[in-house]
Image (spheres, grey):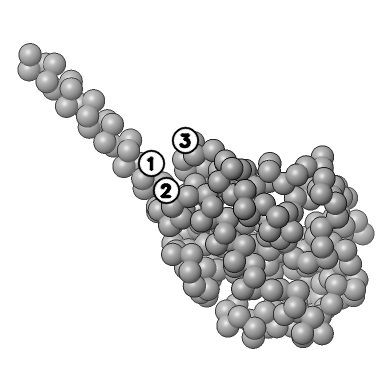
């Protein structure tokens, strides 16, 4: 009898430990990266791109994602396998997502594969902040409205015209507009030229306020980088 009781207690301990592990994985992060990408730079590479089935996206920065991160540079991922992407939860947001969060991956798709990846890899790790998928996607869309990168850059006479611009000027234009320092990520075009690809902006762990980034991602850009057309 004592042996059965001890075994039962051990099983309870294992279950509690596993539950706590899942909970910690879903809540243990310090801030978010809010990432937007320039479609012209995504497409102007050797691998090129494919427009979504809804047609060519607007010539505007598109959302890549809202990603939980830690101050030491690590990040949680795929935190809740029991919460797959459910498009019915975001049906009222689909038109905004198609416009502001378009897929450019090949083969062409509607966007659902992209959004599913973003939710399952990143969104599930912020379920302590966003009570459901709708809240996660709506907050990310609202951040896009809050940080209109194209308008900010054009207001500083930095245009997607295929010209080269000083990296410092790009960074300073965004910082002057939002009050915080962005991280600029570059990729290279088919000729090997460095070009403006993605912009990282940091958001506090509540998902509510822009903040200075505790840490920046890796990678380097040239001193002058291209801002390609789209």
| SS at circle 2 | helix
Front-lying residue, 93 or 196: 93
Above or below residue 136? Residue 61 is below
| SS at circle 3 | loop
Which residue sits furthest top? 1
The residue wearing badge 3 is 82
| SS at circle 1 | helix
Task: List x then y, in percent, for residue 119.
Answer: 57, 47
The residue wearing badge 2 is 26
Distance Cα–Cα, label 2 vs label 3: 12 Å
Asked whether the viewer can see residue 222, the reply is yes
Above or below residue 8? Residue 44 is below
Front-lying residue, 218 or 57: 57
Nearer to us: label 1 or label 3: 3
Packing grade of label 3 (10 A; few <14, some 14-19, many >=20) is: few
Residue 22 numbered tag: 1
Task: List x then y, in percent, for residue 27.
Answer: 40, 52
Packing grade of label 2 (10 A; few <14, some 14-19, many >=20) is: many
Front-lying residue, 127 or 228: 127
Give the quadrant of the C terminus.
bottom right
Please give the name of the residue rendered at 22% of the width and 29% of the height, measured from the top-left corner.
Answer: 12
Please give the name of the residue rendered at 75% of the width and 44% of the height, measured from the top-left corner.
Answer: 110
């Amino acid at each position: 009898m004592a042996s059965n009781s001890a075994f039962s207690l051990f099983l309870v301990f294992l279950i509690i430990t596993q539950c706590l592990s899942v909970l910690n994985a879903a809540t243990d992060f310090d801030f978010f990266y809010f990432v937007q990408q320039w479609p012209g730079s995504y497409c102007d590479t050797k691998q090129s791109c494919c427009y979504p089935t809804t047609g060519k996206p607007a010539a505007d920065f598109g959302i890549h994602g809202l990603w939980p991160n830690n101050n030491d540079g690590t990040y949680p991922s795929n935190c809740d396998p029991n919460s797959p992407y459910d498009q019915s939860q975001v049906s009222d947001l689909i038109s905004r997502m198609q416009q502001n969060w378009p897929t450019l991956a090949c083969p062409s798709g509607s966007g659902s594969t992209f959004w599913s990846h973003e939710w399952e890899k990143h969104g599930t790790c912020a379920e302590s902040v966003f009570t459901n998928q709708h809240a996660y996607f709506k907050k990310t869309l609202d951040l896009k409205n809050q940080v209109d990168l194209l308008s900010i850059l054009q207001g500083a006479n930095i245009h997607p015209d295929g010209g080269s611009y000083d990296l410092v000027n790009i960074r300073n234009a965004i910082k002057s507009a939002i009050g915080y320092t962005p991280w600029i990520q570059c990729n290279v075009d088919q000729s090997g030229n460095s070009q403006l690809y993605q912009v990282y902006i940091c958001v506090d762990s509540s998902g509510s306020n822009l903040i200075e980034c505790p840490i920046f991602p890796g990678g380097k850009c040239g001193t002058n980088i291209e801002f390609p057309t789209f």
